[in-house]
């Protein structure tokens, strides 16, 4: 007598959603305003404009640019606008913030662009552990996106999940 093993997880119809799939694909390059300031503290408009004109923008080609200032300096808003204007033709995206903040913003943006139709009335497991650092904000965002449409939302792996939400049965 041969026993047939049935993979109940595979047959359950559960959709696994891995947030790593929505992680920014392009490299993040940091543009630190500090490097363009006099003594890393003071913005001198003429010098700043000259340094921007001499900037090799090719190093930002097709990259996500994290535009930040790591110095405790007062930077006028127009200076950020000048940098954005210089980088916009070559950069894939320009975001104000550190590299980590920029990565999170793009991840959240990508999650926000998910079309939820494929998850309508489905049982969804949002994958837990992985290789990339997925923030709490990303898990909150995907929950907000899925809750209105999913039959249920779970966290973890299909073989071991933590229930997060289950749509009430309407009778």
Image (cartoon, rainbow, N blue to C red):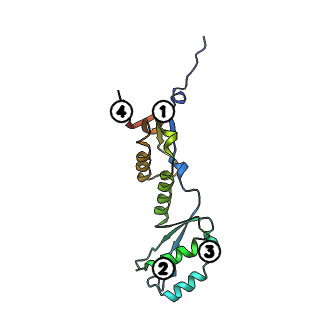
Q: Label 4, on which residue?
A: 168
* Outermost top residue: 1
Q: Quadrant of residue 57?
A: bottom right
Task: Name the element at disc 1.
Answer: loop
Q: CA distance from mark 4 to mark 1?
A: 23 Å
* Outermost front residue: 171
Q: CA distance from mark 2 to mark 3?
A: 16 Å
Q: Could you classify mark 2 by the number of other residues whose Cα lies within 10 Å: few (under 14), some (14-19), or many (20 or more)?
A: some
Question: Closer to the camera, 17 or 36?
Answer: 17
Q: Label 1, on which residue?
A: 159
* Outermost right residue: 58
Q: Is residue 123 left or right of residue 10?
A: left
Instruction: Please give the name of the residue rendered at 50% of the width and 41% of the height, measured from the top-left corner.
Output: 117
**Which one is earlier in the sequence, the residue at label 2 or at label 3?**
3
Q: CA distance from mark 1 to mark 3?
A: 48 Å
- The mark tally for this picture is 4
Q: Label 3, on which residue?
A: 57
**Which one is earlier in the sequence, the residue at label 2 or at label 4?**
2
Q: Label 2, on which residue?
A: 79
**Which one is earlier in the sequence, the residue at label 2 or at label 1?**
2
Q: Position of residue 118 (x, y in %)?
A: 52, 40
Task: Name the element at disc 4.
Answer: loop
Q: CA distance from mark 2 to mark 4?
A: 52 Å
């Amino acid at each position: 007598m041969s026993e047939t093993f049935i993979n109940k997880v595979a047959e359950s119809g559960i959709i696994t959603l891995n947030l790593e799939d929505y992680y920014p694909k392009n490299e993040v390059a940091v543009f630190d305003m500090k490097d363009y300031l006099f003594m890393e503290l003071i913005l001198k408009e003429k010098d700043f404009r000259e340094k921007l004109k001499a900037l090799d923008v090719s190093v930002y080609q097709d990259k996500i640019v994290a535009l930040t200032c790591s110095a405790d300096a007062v930077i006028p808003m127009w200076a950020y606008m000048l940098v954005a204007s210089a980088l916009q033709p070559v950069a894939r995206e320009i975001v104000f913030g550190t590299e980590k903040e920029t990565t999170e913003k793009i991840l959240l943006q990508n999650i926000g662009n998910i079309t939820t139709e494929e998850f309508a009335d489905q049982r969804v497991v949002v994958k837990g552990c992985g290789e990339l650092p997925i923030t709490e904000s990303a898990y909150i965002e995907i929950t907000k996106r899925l809750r209105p449409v999913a039959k249920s939302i779970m966290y973890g792996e299909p073989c071991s999940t933590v229930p997060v939400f289950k749509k009430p049965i309407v009778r």
